[in-house]
Image (cartoon, rainbow, N blue to C red):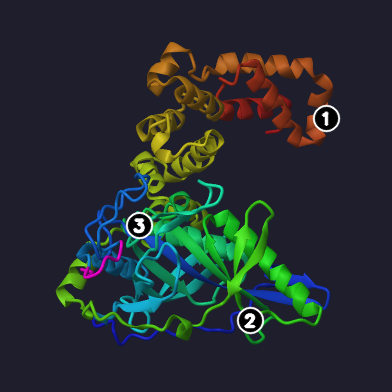
Amino acid sequence: MNRTEKKREYSDVRVAKAESLIKGATGDWEIVIGMEVHAQVTSESKLFSGSATRFGAAPNSQVSLVDAAMPGMLPVINAECVRQAVRTGLGLRAVINRRSVFDRKNYFYPDLPQGYQISQYKYPIVGEGEIVLDMLDGERIVVGIERLHLEQDAGKSVHDQHPTMSFVDLNRSGVALMEIVSRPDLRSAEEARVYLSKLRTILRYLGTSDADMEKGNLRADVNVSVRRPGGPLGTRCEIKNVNSIRFAGQAIEYEARRQIAILEDGGSIDQETRLFDARTGETRSMRSKEEAHDYRYFPDPDLLPLVLDESMIAELQTGLPELPDDKRTRFIKDFGLSGYDASILVADQDSADFFEEVAQERDAKLAANWVINELFGRLNKDGLSISESPVSAAALGTIIDLISEAVISGKIAKDLFEIVWTEGGEPRALVEARGLKQVTDTGAIEAAVAAVVEANPEKAAQALAKPTLAGWFVGQVMKATGGKANPQVVNALVKARLGLE
């Protein structure tokens, strides 16, 4: 299919839901948000040189003559970076442009040796695409992707190593970046957070960027403006280089309220670039916002137009992994999961793989419940990733089997999970060794029920008028049996003893 001519239609008049509007002194205001996300391409070498891209290397130890912009040095395109950009475009359901052009974007930074950045402007490698957001309330929002282009990163200025001087580290100079530009389709800080999370997930599934914000491998420039609901777009301010999803949300909320306060005071918004200070939770002015003509773009004379072969695109399309939206759809269809549970499970590829191993030939809904509530809850509490879980997928699957086989109750299962988490061991062997099997002997349970009922005659009499009191008796019997009695048997025997059946 020739995707070059494909044109997507998006609405600029999407209005936020009432709960997303901000109450001002003079009425409601709507936030309009667009994102420019820079993702470092997963590649062993830089975009136009053979220098390494290893994180954490000694300053200026990964710099070639090309990266340092020495006279006579010519850039040579890294074919793997091109493939990674195309794979990302395909993953974003975007137009892949068969012909793209590299431009020189002229500006001065002390850590930009050439005095210009090699980027793409009018003719990017990837055109229009989309990302679908699954919100907690069940709403699905389509966010338009305007473009994805390749460009080289600048170096890094270091200001805290000397009292009177700044240092420059050029290790990042020339590293390949994908700039992914969204349309202004986001209407709240929460939507922006979900967008960044979803984009990061897609990049990681594709393997085109590790999208690690702590390492600076995923950075967001957030464009924020406000308007009356459904009105014309306001003047935007760009919040530069936000390096965490949480900070992005905080920056948007502060910036929107700052702009509203100015407008309601009768002022106007200056188009500018701002920085977010995580310590104060505020944005501050950095510089007036440049326009495209300020950069004096022109085609880089050292680089020919990039022309993509149809067979290469077809090969990359065939090699794409199952992406989050497709996996979510399959989890709902094949496993009978809710959209909410499926969205949580596919948000991380390792977590999705873990769940699938647990759910294999088991009750998938029960497996999802254990993975999401028990496992994820404990991982979050201990600050661990799924790959660091002390409880393996096989072990968790065995615990679920023991529940399904009525060998242990749900309460015992939680105790068993805690033992495996803290001490290790094979769940079946632990159940045998520690006498954790639930009591299924009806006679023993009947005796426990009789003892509890006889010890509480007043409550037993009240239960006839208030049947919900049976739950209290069930709890007391479970407590008396150390949680080992079969809950279903206890429930039935309690009701029979109280005359509720």
Residue under numbered circle 2: 235
For discs 3 and 2, the disc positioned in front in the rendered view: 2
Nearest to N terminus: mark 1 or mark 3: 3
Label 1, label 2: how far apart the Cα atoms are: 68 Å
Residue 72 painted magenta: yes
Q: Quadrant of the C terminus?
A: top right
Q: Position of residue 51 (x, y in %)?
A: 25, 55
Q: Is residue 331 left or right of residue 251?
A: left
Q: Secondary structure at mark 3?
A: loop
Q: Position of residue 6 (x, y in %)?
A: 33, 85
For discs 1 and 3, the disc positioned in front in the rendered view: 3
Residue 209: image tag: 3
Residue under numbered circle 1: 462
User: Which residue is painted at 66% across and 83% down in the image?
Assistant: 230
Q: Quadrant of the N terminus?
A: bottom left
Residue 166 painted magenta: no
Nearest to N terminus: mark 3 or mark 2: 3
Label 3, label 2: how far apart the Cα atoms are: 32 Å
Give, as a single range, the part of the protein colored magenta: 68-76
Q: Amino acid at mark 1?
A: Gln
